[in-house]
Every structure is written in C-alpha cells, then in structure tokens.
Image (spheres, helix red, strand yellow):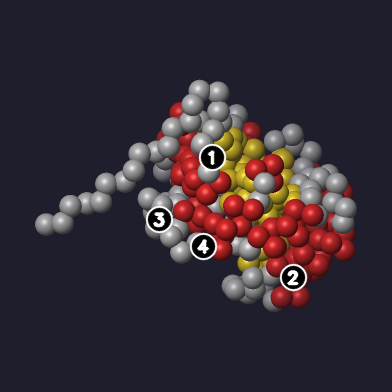
C-alpha cells in the first residue's frame, strides 16, 4: 500500500504581521457547514481580513450581510460577466443603497470572460462599462474579472481614466507586460494560489517584476486552492502558501 503524501506545514507569520484575503466567496455552498471554523483558522494564523465578493444581486446582499456579522470581513458588490444580462437601472439603484454601508469596500467582481461566454460579448461589455461608471460614481475601487479579455478591458478602463479610487485586477492571469499596463492605470495586481503551480511559469515571472507596492494575495475561494491543497476546497488561511511562494520568487522572507 502506498503512503499518503505528507503536506508541508502551514507557513507561520511572526507576531505583528497580518494578511488579507482580498477575494473570497464566503457565501458559497462549500462554506455553509463550517464557516465559523474557516474564519477561526484564518484569524488564528494571521489572516485577519477577508473581502467577500458579490457576483450577482443575491450574493452581493449576502456579502454585505456576512460583513456585518463578522468583524474581520468586508464586502464588495457587483454583477459578474456570467450574469451580465441581469444588470440594469433597478440593480444599479440597489447597489447605490448597499454602497452606503461602511463595510462595502469595493465594486465587483465585474469584467469580461471570453472563455465561458454565458452572456454574449456585447452584453458583457455594456454591463462592464456601465458598472465601471457606477463604481466611479460611488467612489469605490473596482474589482476586475479578466479572462482572456485583456485588450477589451484595458481599452475600456483607459478610456475612462483616471479612475480616482483605482482597483484590483483579480486573479491575475496575464504576463509582466500586461501587469505594467494595468498598474499604469492605477490598478493593483492580485495573485491567486495558481502561482504555486509548477507550470504557472508566466505568472511566476510576472510576480518577479511586479513591485510589492502593487501586489495583493487572494484565494478566490472556494476555488483555486494552492499547492499543497490543489483540487481541494480553498479557504482564506491558504493565502499563506501563496504569500510564501511570492516571497520565494522575489528572494524575500515571508514577512
């Protein structure tokens, strides 16, 4: 009988150092049975802040509710490109009201997805651009979903620049050159657990070039768990593996 592969220990932060999981979907079903334990594990390990992300009207309302319930959790609101056809004036008005809550810290995730075109491309683009305009009106940072849509998203953002509150390119999947272009527009680059995968060479090279001042870490939980939990449910405490990989790539300590 073959022995089960032993996973390396969770990286440990020294006292006084903290991490934020900038993108997680705490409202989703995989967390339903043990959310309290998930949050406790994160807090104990030093992941003391989590942004839970809205992807449609229901999840945006749930994100705000979760943020109000847990002190270390904040929320974003928005309509994901998969649900782009659901965005309109009525939804925008609800988001205006939600944005008055002090625990709402961002607008998104919004953007375009050219891999899974659940909404037609023109519908995605109109919903994206209308929501960028709404985020600017609400003075909220914009959380961008960009899947094989670098050119279209960059063009839309550049035509609206400057964007005073900036934003985040979530789950960054581009190369160093694209990172530079988005940073020039005032965006931060959020790195998922994918950076720990052996074949993620382009993303690893981008991380080497992105300055620490523009780097964030995220889970995109419950998806995209880093090694050594690849294929399992992701959770905020695993941002420690992602942060350690970034430190290794840059020749730095975890702290």
Q: Position of residue 112 (x, y in %)?
A: 69, 67
Q: Which residue is mark 1?
A: 252
Along the line of sight, the residue nearer the viewer: 123 or 207 = 207
Is tag 1's residue or tag 2's residue first in the polypeptide sequence?
2
- Screen quadrant of the C terminus: top right
Tell me the tag on residue 111.
Answer: none
Q: CA distance from mark 4 to mark 2?
A: 21 Å
Residue contact between numbered discs 2 and 3, judged by CB atoms under 8 Å:
no
Query: In this image, 166 relative to 109: left or right?
Result: right
| Quadrant in the rendering for residue 129 | bottom right
Give the class, few, some or many, for how many residues have Cα within 10 Å of label 2's Cα (few <14, many ≥20).
few
Tell me the tag on residue 151.
Answer: 2
| Quadrant in the rendering for residue 197 | bottom left
Image position of 36 with respect to 196: above or below: above
Is tag 1's residue or tag 3's residue first in the polypeptide sequence?
3
Q: Position of residue 142 (x, y in %)?
A: 75, 51
Q: Position of residue 25 (x, y in %)?
A: 56, 49
Give the class, few, some or many, for how many residues have Cα within 10 Å of label 1's Cα (few <14, many ≥20).
few
Residue contact between numbered discs 4 and 1, judged by CB atoms under 8 Å:
no
Is tag 4's residue or tag 2's residue first in the polypeptide sequence?
2
Tell me the tag on residue 230.
Answer: 3
> Residue drawn 79% across and 50% down?
186
Q: CA distance from mark 1 to mark 2?
A: 32 Å
> Residue drawn 51% across and 37% down?
254
Is tag 2's residue or tag 3's residue first in the polypeptide sequence?
2
Q: As drawn, which residue projects farthest toward the front?
A: 251
Is tag 4's residue or tag 1's residue first in the polypeptide sequence?
4
Q: Nearer the viewer, mark 4 or mark 2?
A: 4
Tell me the tag on residue 201.
Answer: 4
Q: Nearer the viewer, mark 1 or mark 3?
A: 1
Image position of 43 with respect to 31: above or below: above
Decide if residue 249 is in sight here. yes
């Amino acid at each position: 009988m073959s022995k089960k592969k032993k996973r390396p220990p969770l990286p440990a932060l020294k006292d006084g150092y903290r991490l934020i999981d900038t993108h997680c979907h705490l409202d989703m079903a995989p967390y339903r049975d043990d959310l309290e334990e998930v949050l406790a594990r994160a807090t104990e390990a030093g992941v003391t802040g989590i942004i839970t992300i809205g992807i449609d009207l229901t999840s945006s309302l749930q994100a705000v509710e979760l943020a109000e319930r847990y002190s270390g959790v904040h929320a974003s609101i928005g309509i994901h490109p998969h649900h782009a056809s659901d965005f309109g004036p009525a939804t925008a008005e609800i988001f205006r009201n939600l944005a008055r809550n002090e625990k709402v810290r961002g607008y998104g995730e919004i953007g375009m997805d050219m891999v899974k075109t659940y909404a037609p491309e023109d519908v995605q683009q109109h919903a994206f651009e209308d929501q960028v305009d709404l985020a600017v009106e609400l003075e909220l940072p914009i959380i961008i979903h960009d899947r094989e849509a670098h050119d279209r998203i960059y063009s839309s953002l550049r035509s609206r620049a400057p964007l005073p509150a900036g934003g985040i390119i979530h789950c960054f999947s581009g190369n160093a050159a694209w990172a530079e272009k988005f940073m020039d527009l005032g965006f931060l680059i959020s790195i998922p657990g994918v950076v720990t995968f052996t074949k993620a060479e382009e993303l690893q090279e981008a991380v080497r070039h992105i300055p620490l001042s523009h780097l964030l870490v995220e889970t995109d939980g419950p998806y995209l768990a880093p090694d050594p939990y690849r294929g399992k449910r992701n959770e905020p405490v695993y941002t420690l593996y992602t942060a350690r990989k970034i430190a290794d790539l840059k020749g730095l300590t975890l702290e």
